[in-house]
Image: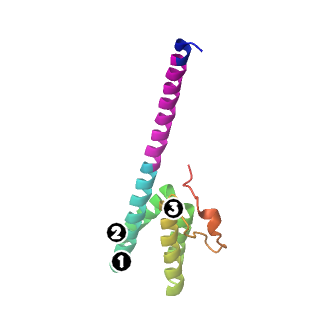
Amino acid sequence: MDWSAALGLIGLGALLKSGVDFFLSRKSARTDLQYKEKRETYIGLLDALHKAAIEPSDINSKNFALWQTRVQLFGSPDVAKAVQGIIDTNDGPREKREEFFSKMLKCMKADLSSYTLIPCYLGKSHDPTLSRFRQPAP
């Protein structure tokens, strides 16, 4: 092989590497943005839930409903189901509400971590080997 062909292959390799690096950086930036949106949503929901619990009012209830809607938009379906469970058991036994609250926290942790061993199955059996590499949905 002559020198011009070798230099051409090196140049082609450099272009290919640049393209791969570009797409990987875009994916990383998108993943970071999704993580930040979810984290902000979950923290806002917990804050609104706290305010509604310590100072019940129409304003705090509406604020909680707003954050619940954000969870439905940006959060995982498991977290949204657990939040709905908290609402549905609001007038029921405290133990059930606390159970849904615990499930909500576990699901939030699982959703915010890229690789997790935290079970987040509402009423289903858990196999830790299957959830080890759980990735956020695209």
- Picture residue at 51% right of the left edge, 61% below the top: 111
- Give the residue number, with chain letter if any, for mark 3: 111
- Picture residue at 36% right of the left edge, 69% below the top: 47
Where in the figure is residue 118, as x and y percent of width and height? 54, 69
Rounded to the nearest angstrom, the CA distance separating label 2 from label 3 is 29 Å
Q: Is residue 36 above or below residue 43?
A: above
How many marks do you count on the picture?
3
Q: Which residues are magenta?
A: 7-31
Q: Is residue 72 magenta?
A: no
Q: Is residue 6 left or right of residue 60?
A: right
In the picture, the disc for residue 138 is none
Q: Assess whether mark 3 and mark 1 are in contact (beta carbons under 8 angstroms).
A: no
In the picture, the disc for residue 56 is 1
Identify which residue, 130 or 58, lies in the foreground.
130
Where in the figure is residue 97, as x and y percent of width and height? 51, 81
Mark 3 crowdedness (10 Å alpha carbons): few <14, some 14-19, many ≥20: many
Sequence-wise first label, 1 or 3 = 1
In the picture, the disc for residue 59 is 2
* Element assignment for label 2: helix
